[in-house]
Image (cartoon, helix red, strand yellow):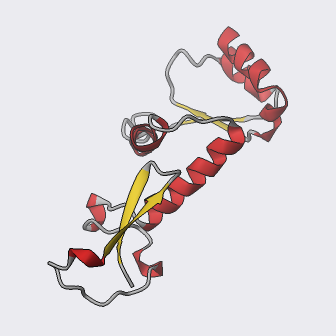
Amino acid sequence: MQQARHLAMDLADRISTLRFLIHDRDPVFTGAFDEVFKAEGVRIIRTPPQTPRMNAVCERLIGTLRRELLDRVLVLGERHLVLVLGEYLDHYNGHRPHPARNQLPPDTEAQPVQDPVEPNDLRSIRRRPAVTGVVNEYHHAA
């Protein structure tokens, strides 16, 4: 409960922008812990029982963000973090290959169709820095 109070105090005015607190049914999240956030108007949502994989997608995304972005960028503040995450979101959905989608990005339908290029013609490939220069994207030259 003390940690919840400290977090609420650290968030100060920003706690009013929070709508939900999602956590599992671990006994460390006591009723007193939840009451600290309920008093601030935050709705508590507990994950359903016996659903061990429910957090897996979120944890995988957080791990990807840490490995590919946050471990390589010095974030200078909240505004800078929002900018960097927005750039990474564009890269993640528009250019980054996803194994579950046959190495295609999620937004392949939104991308222009390109004519096939000679596979051995490497001169037509151009590199473009993305996500504040942390990631490079490769495209065929027009």
Q: For residue 19, say whether it is visible.
A: yes
**Residue extending furthest toward the bottom:** 115
Residue at x 58% of width, y 48% of height = 84
Q: For residue 1, say whether it is visible.
A: no
* Whether residue 103 is situated above or below residue 11 in the rendered picture: below
Please give left or right for residue 104 compared with residue 110 in the image.
Answer: left
Identify which residue, 78 or 54, lies in the foreground.
Answer: 78
The image quadrant that residue 18 belongs to is top right
Please give left or right for residue 106 compared with residue 4 in the image.
Answer: left
The image quadrant that residue 29 belongs to is top right
Q: Position of residue 137 (x, y in %)?
A: 39, 63
Please give left or right for residue 125 compared with residue 11 in the image.
Answer: left
Q: Position of residue 113 (x, y in %)?
A: 38, 87
Residue at x 45% of width, y 34% of height = 71
The image quadrant that residue 99 belongs to is bottom left
Identify which residue, 49 or 124, lies in the foreground.
Answer: 124
Residue at x 82% of width, y 36% of height = 16
Say which quadrant the N terminus sits in: top right
Q: Position of residue 114 (x, y in %)?
A: 35, 87
Say which quadrant the C terminus sits in: bottom left
Please give left or right for residue 99 compared with residue 46 in the image.
Answer: left
How many circles with numbers are drawn on the protein? 0
**Residue extending furthest toward the left:** 120
* Whether residue 125 is situated above or below residue 64 in the rendered picture: below
**Residue extending furthest toward the front:** 123
Residue at x 22% of width, y 74% of height = 122
